[in-house]
Amino acid sequence: MGLSNHTHFDSMQLSINSNPSATSASFHLSNTMDAHRRTLARLSSGKRIVSPADDAGGLAVGKKLGSRLSILKKVKQNNLNSKSFTDLQYGALKSATEILSRMSELKTMSLDTTKNQSDVENYNKEFLELQLELKEISREKFNGISLFTAIDKSDHALQSIASDYTNPGNVVSLARNFIKSEFVGSLGHTLGEFTSTTSSSTSTGSVDISTKAGATGVNPDGSPLAIGQADLNWTVTGPQTTTFRINPIRGAWVSDNLTKSGKWIGVTNGSRGNYTYSMSFDLSGVDLNSVQISGKIATDDGGELFINGESMGIFTGFTNLRSFDLQSSATGILVDGTNNKPNILVDGVNTVEVRVNNVGGPTGLLFDELKISASQTTTTTTTTTSQTYPGLRDFTQEDFTGFIEQLADAIAQVGAEQSRLDMNAQQLESAEINLEAAHGRIMDVDMARESTRYSKTKVLVQSSASMVSQANKQTDLVLRLMVNR
């Protein structure tokens, strides 16, 4: 049986519910539109990667390169600022060199034997003004930062980061102490530094010695205690150890209305025996041969005044206020200007004591207007700062030669730093160009290639839209068949 030649055609079913051709054409149109939109986004933004889905890995690398590029630009600015700093520093050092050269000339001229004292003094006047100017140069600042650091700091106190690494080798030193406190001559004098003098004076004067109270029966502020209130300013030993303010026996005791501030203290019904009332005072740091103690005393019954346990020969009673005056000297204590007692005063705490012998019944003490004074020697130290700067005679010619050599070394150091900054600036510029190119290759769109792709997708969009329109017309055949029947 022979084989017969035949052609096979896929049959296409005509239906109303489905149109595979239109669906397929619509699918291709949608894909073409997506590609066209991506092309439009790249062309309008100039970026190859518009969304992370375009190239996730490339986007990550591009972001890191972009960050590095931003840092590099700021480092370049730091470099330029450092260059400006060294420029200002060089200008200051150049001026300082001229000043030192002029100082050297003045020193040479002052050594001329034909110059009289007046000529040398005139040279000194200019020398002083040049020192002041040199001091002003040492204080110059750049944006609030000192051009020249203090002598007690390291040689390179101010530094500038010259790259985005923290390697110490990439740190450029800027500030050194080339001027301030560095120009010290062989005789020990320093250019631009004045000398200060210290003086002291001694004076002697009378001072009041403070006590808890200047009278009995009063508060520390001088106001009277209430009747029956304990007097805490005076201590008492004897049959009773606490004493209170009491009313005096009218007609017998001295009225405390006649006193300046003192009031009677004691007990209204005391046991027989000796009562010792005492108050302390401090004589530390005073002249013990110049102490004066005075006051007024009344006691019931008889009383006697003691200083540091030594009787002063002053006896009292209740009928009148007994005034007394004690004056110490190198020979002792003069009592009321007549009797002399040994000087038992000590440098420190001393006591005034009044011993009262009570024969029974009420007893007490009235002390008023207690005053203690003494001479005290004080030393006052006054520091005066005089604007006395060293003169030409305080330096040798060799000193100025050394100063100029120091400054020449300083200028050379600044020049070396400027050279390094210039080289670093060139390296930073090259690095920025290369980084920017690398970043652009990853992130920037190829405009020529993308324009070609744009033309292609534009034609495809138009073609796909036309095919969708044609495919949608296939259902018209079904309608014609139905109408013809």
Image: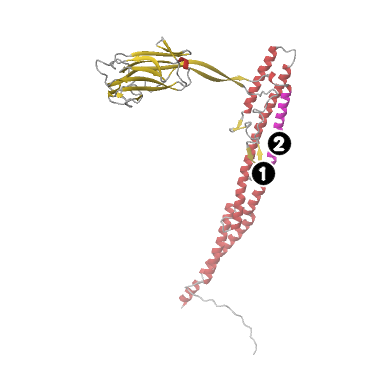
Is residue 411 magenta-colored? yes
Type of amino acid under label 1: Leu
Is residue 25 magenta-colored? no
Residue 416 - label? 2
Q: Is residue 184 visible to the viewer in this orientation of the structure?
A: yes
Type of amino acid under label 2: Ala
Nearer-the-camera pick, 262 or 346: 346
Residue 428 - label? 1
Q: Position of residue 457 (x, y in %)?
A: 59, 60
Nearer-the-camera pick, 14 or 275: 275
Q: Quadrant of residue 88?
A: top right
User: Which comes sooner in the sequence, label 1 or label 2?
Assistant: 2
Q: Is residue 147 visible to the viewer in this orientation of the structure?
A: no
Q: Position of residue 195 (x, y in %)?
A: 62, 21
Taking 347 as reference, is 172 above or below it? below
Are the two marked residues, 1 and 2, in contact with CB atoms closer than 8 angstroms?
Answer: no
Residue stretch in magenta? 398-425
